[in-house]
Image: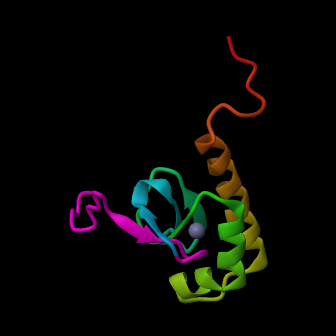
Amino acid sequence: MPTDTTGKKKPQRQCIGCGERHDKKDLIRIVQSPEGKLSADATGRSQGRGAYICPKPECLQKAVKKRGLNRAFKREIRPEELTAVTEDFSRICDQLAGTGGGNDGT
Ligand SMILES: [Zn+2]
């Protein structure tokens, strides 16, 4: 069976929630701006220190519980910051999920 674990085609990152490795493009990046503002970065191109989480609410929850964000950003994350990141995160999850929800198309 073909396993190309040796092929380094796709960059992989570790989810700070579940700890599994996935293609970078399949993860949501949490980024801290130079001003110290945390946000979920849909494009993966924002400047700053970043951490990666699977696009699943449970992985964000795990990351919060394990204080993975604190570790990734080497500081205490305030509750209101977590709230803002969680909101960003779920919005991006919805986008990734495609056209599910309030889309009255055609
Ligand atoms: Zn995960």
Say how the picture is coloured.
rainbow
Position of the C terminus, as image quadrant, is: top right
Q: Among all residues in the image, which is located at the extreme left?
A: 7
Relative side of 15 to 44, left or right: right
Using residue 78 as the reference point, say whether residue 70 is left or right of it.
Answer: left
Location of residue 20 in the rendering, given as x and y in whole percent from the top left corner: 51, 73
Q: Residue at x 71, y 62 (%)?
A: 57
**Which quadrant holds residue 17?**
bottom right
| Range of magenta residues | 1-19
Per the picture, the main secondary structure of the magenta-coloured stretch is loop
Q: In percent of the image, x 26 and y 61: which residue is there?
A: 4
How far from the left and from the top, in percent, is residue 13? Answer: 41, 69
Asked whether 86 or 37 is in front, the reply is: 86
The picture quadrant where one finds residue 66 is bottom right
Q: Residue placed farthest to the top in the image?
A: 106
Most distant residue in the front direction: 1
Ligand 1 quadrant?
bottom right
Q: Is residue 8 magenta?
A: yes
Residue 18 included in the magenta stretch of the image: yes
Q: Is residue 66 above or below residue 9?
A: below
- Taking the spot 45% from the left edge, 64% from the top edge, the residue there is 22
Q: Quadrant of the N terminus?
A: bottom left
Q: On screen, 65 above or below 29?
A: below
Q: Position of residue 97 (x, y in %)?
A: 63, 42
Task: Report the residue at 76% width, 67% height from top.
Answer: 83
Tell me how many marks there are: 0
